[in-house]
Amino acid sequence: MYLLEVRDLTKHFGGIRAIEEVRFRVKEGSIMSIIGPNGAGKTTLFNCLTGITRPTKGAISFFDREITRLGRDSIVKLGVARTFQNIRLFKEMTVIENVMVSQHCRTQSGFLSAIIRSSSFRNEEKTIREKALEYLELVGLEAYSDTIAGSLPYGSQKRLEIARAIATEPRLILLDEPTAGMNPQETGEMMGLIKKLQELGKTIILIEHDMKVVMGISENIVVLDHGVKIAEGTPSEIKSNSMVIEAYLGKEH
Amino acid sequence: MKKAPIHRFADSPIHRFTHSPIFIALWLALLFLPFKGLEAAGVLFIVLFAAVSLLRVFKNYAGKIKGLLSSLKKFISGRIRIKLPESKTRSIALTLLMSVVVMALPFYGHDYLIDIAVLSGIYIILAQGLNIVVGFTGLLNLGFVAFYAIGAYSYALLNTKLGIGFWASLPLSVMLVTLSGFILAIPALRLKGDYLAIVTLGFGEIVRLVLNNWDSFTKGPNGIGGIEPPHIFGMQISRLGQFYYFIIIFVLLAVFIIRRVAASRIGRAWIAIREDEIASSSIGINTTAYKLYSFAFGAFWAGLAGVLFAAKMQFVSPESFTFMESVLILCMVILGGLGSIPGVILGAIILVMLPEMLREVQLYRMLALGSGLVMLMIFRPQGLMGGKGVSFRS
């Protein structure tokens, strides 16, 4: 059973072909990496998957459901969460508020129950808070729950973004360069966290430049170059693929 | 690390001469000479010479002035900071004291003071409404007064044309205003930042112009008079003291409800949208819907304030709903602190009271108010009680 199926996905920005007929499938519970040189269209692909940009052509189906034209919030509700390459936290909110607000699409109390503080509202608030603490514990930030998110160090902000993604209760998590700018120790911790997410039954797609991470944890790798998929396969297959080597290192003369 | 000198010849005599005030003034005056003649060039030379010399003098003192300003800033911000009571008993005592002062106002204050207090109450409700839109959700609305006007006029018209009383008109008017909030929001929310501000500004002006020019319906600039004051249990609320308590009930209601909504998932979603719209939609918030709610919920309170205003004045005219009024409400929100409910109450009270207190110095009143606001924005950009630094992003 495939969790995600991308068919002939194409995105043009005016004359620029950001992605050209990309297709791949992701198995449930697996970790997949998307790699490629800068400007290969990796982030655009993520943006298409999460509804931030509309693809020019092609289709995306998630659990046999077409999500190509859905709104961002509906896609999240179906179970696709993401993090951003350049961290996008709610900087003025506290760490725990960041995770609490991320459970928005899994809760439903409205104006009236908020005003009269009905029992269902109070229960819901309590569950949201408890769950938020749980998610913070998972990423190791429970001690900072009342810190303003913007004042966290860089590595912790990256982890908070992951906690926020998990809080939406997704089946598929898209991580855009989770280890960018991290030192080897932090990178190791991040790899551990990603594996932990897999153990929790989440499917993960990551964009990553650090080959140690890519080769170390992914089961399947898709290589993009100038918007075109040039290779797909297991880490060992990709390592020896001549097209990939050419894309990264240039043609041999 | 020391920076390498940029001008190697900075101290050479040639450099000193070409940068002297007399050379600069002479050079510019000579350039000017062919156009306006000797006399004008001479005047220009003297003026330029004086100006450049003066600038030089100030430049030498720039460091000192800067130091003086920063120490002044430290001194003032140290004084301005509002100290919150630390212990719980102290805070309870303070609240009690404040509520006694507020509740007993009609017994010790004269009519003028009560009148201003009633006006403050109306503005508190208005500013709280705008705070939802600007402070929580981060949408700059420059035409907020339109909702205030629609609220006031709908009560005025329902009452004078159809003879509907206050309590029946209140829900009708407020519903109408909320609906108009939705109607404005639908086209406006496609826009962001500055563009949204311009559209809302336009909306405010359109409403005022319609009220001003639709003579057969709104009586145009003459306004509508003879509006009935509210009744409670058959008792007419027309005396100032009575109206004061009447307003207080609505202010408390507004603060109570807004606080609860702000502390719920709805309020959190609004703040998330203010912080980062793309991120908030990527965690599953329907940003369009929540911006719509924010607009309508804000409009709701403006409508209520409008109805209360019409009931108090017993007269409405387009003059009360100009663009300056929108700006004043926005100032209250910014002064108090974007997103801070107690701060906005304080901001509203200050901006209603201050111009009245400054009547002594008539001529310089607005000047003092304006420079006060400028000072505040320099020393406390987050507002009096806003803990969070909020900026508008487009």
Image: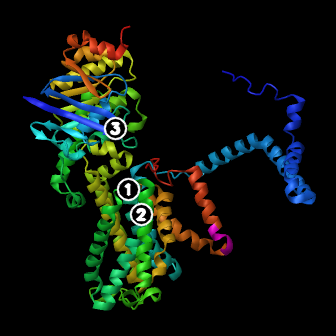
Q: Which residue is mark 1?
A: B191
In this view, the residue farthest toward the front is A253
What is the chain letter for disc 3? A
| Residue shown at 22% from the left, 34% from the top | A9
Q: Is residue B365 magenta?
A: yes
What is the chain letter for disc 2? B
Q: Is B328 in front, or is B193?
A: B193
- Left or right of B110 in this view: A153: left
Q: Is B350 in front, or is B223?
A: B223
Q: Give the residues in magenta.
A: B362-366
| Residue shown at 27% from the left, 34% from the top | A46
Q: Which mark is residue A189?
A: none
- In this view of the protein, can residue B32 be seen by the observer? yes
Q: Is residue B50 magenta?
A: no
Is B306 located above or below residue B187 in the figure? below
- Residue B25 image point, x, y percent: 86, 48
Badge 1 and badge 2 both on one subunit? yes
Is A33 located above or below residue A116 in the figure? above
Q: Which residue is mark 3?
A: A95
Q: Which residue is mark 2?
A: B199
Residues at circles 3 and 1 in contact by the CB criterion of under 8 Å: no
From mark 3 to mark 1, how far is it between C-alphas?
30 Å
**What is the secondary structure assignment of the residue under circle 2?**
helix
Image depth: mark 3 or mark 1 in front: 1
Badge 2 and badge 3 both on one subunit? no
Of callouts 1 and 2, which one flags the residue occurring earlier in the amino acid sequence?
1
- Residue B368 image point, x, y percent: 64, 65
Circle 2 crowding by C-alpha within 10 Å: few under 14, some 14–19, many from 20: some
